[in-house]
Image: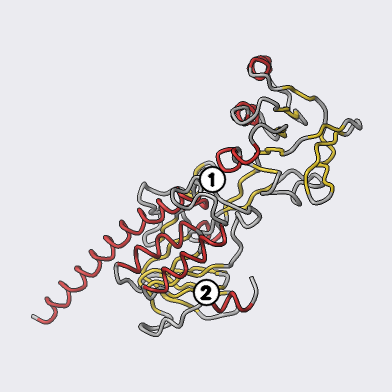
Amino acid sequence: MNEATTKQYENDGSQYDDSEYDVVVVGGGAAGLSAALVLGRARRRVAVVDAAEPRNAPAAHMHGYLSRDGLPPATLLELGRAELERYGVRLLTARVDDVRPADPGYAVHLAGGPQLTTRHVVVATGLRDELPDLPGMRERWGMDVLHCPYCHGWEVRDQPLGVLATRPGSVHQALLVRQWSDDVVFFANTVDPSVEDRERLAARGVRIVEGAVERIAVADGRLRGVELADGRALPRAAVFVAPRFVPHDTLLTALGCATADGWVTTDPAGRTSVPGVWATGNVVDPRAQVITAAGTGASLAFALNAELVEEDVRAAVAGVRVGV
């Protein structure tokens, strides 16, 4: 993100103190912006701190988002930030390097910048896709090396497709991709499908190619096919691969938030095990698409505001009693 764009996403927040907030949202993707929108409209003092490194930046378009199907991901974020500014939400392009308990609430430390104090923290920092270490893989990621057929299958329908196996579950991915094309090759790579899985793939007309994959062949700025270590090369228009999802959850785990199976756990509203710390989007749900993340962000905000209301009421009652 260049300097001019960064400045465009920062307002002055002059209607309230620059460092004290009801809620600081860490992460400015669909989940974080959606939560901030609901909270801003509820007249809460909200800041969104975003490192401007969206997971879906390589993708030219996003899909499956009602009324926004085909919109570039960056455009969705532009529109969302503009909406937040109408409600006085402060937008900061920065990286949060630490969140610590304070009295009351939390202190949010910005890398090389100020400290924000807040009653509650929402972490919506997403995840990163850890791809197989093959030439061409990262270069074409999000363009014609793909993960989600629901996101990209329509655009490559009826073309020669490949599925690069990274784990036994890749068989399911191949059977799913088969819905979009009748020419699907399953590159077994280092995976040895079971007898049952081989039967299922064959029954659906998915061809299995054995042998280690050497590279994703790229020429003239596009994917050309898949090359194997034994020298074979198979032309493909697109290749699907299941990456390893790695959540950006350091802030949450450092605060002691409970985890299960490598992921921070939340209740249905988005509360973590640490009071006042909330999480939403891909940082806690690897399966959440853009529309899902936006919805869970909004749902979290409703619950969080209700909790803030209860805190406000308790403080007001305590003040009246002291006055009496």
The residue drawn where x is 54% and y is 55% is 71
Q: Looking at the picture, how far across and down is residue 304, in whole percent?
A: 32, 60
Using residue 115 as the reference point, say whether residue 111 is left or right of it. right
Using residue 310 as the reference point, say whether residue 160 is left or right of it. right
Q: Looking at the picture, how far across and down is residue 212, in whole percent?
A: 82, 32
Do the CB atoms of the residues marked 1 and 2 lie less than 8 Å apart?
no
- Nearer-the-camera pick, 191 or 275: 191
**Which residue is tagged 2?**
9
Q: In this view, does 200 lie above or below 223?
A: above
Split into 4 quadrants, where in the image is the N terminus?
bottom right
The residue drawn where x is 49% and y is 49% is 284
Q: In this view, does 177 lie above or below 106?
A: above
**Which residue is tagged 1?**
286
Q: Is residue 26 above or below residue 3?
A: above
For badge 1, the amino acid type reads Pro
Whether residue 296 is visible here, answered yes or no, is yes
- Nearer-the-camera pick, 167 or 234: 234
Whether residue 27 is visible here, answered yes or no, is no
Using residue 65 as the reference point, say whether residue 128 is left or right of it. right
- Nearer-the-camera pick, 223 or 1: 223
Q: Looking at the picture, how far across and down is residue 316, in whole percent?
A: 18, 74
Q: How far apart are marks 1 and 2 (CA)?
A: 27 Å
Q: Is residue 284 above or below residue 95?
A: above
- Nearer-the-camera pick, 110 or 131: 131
Label 1, secondary structure: give it: loop
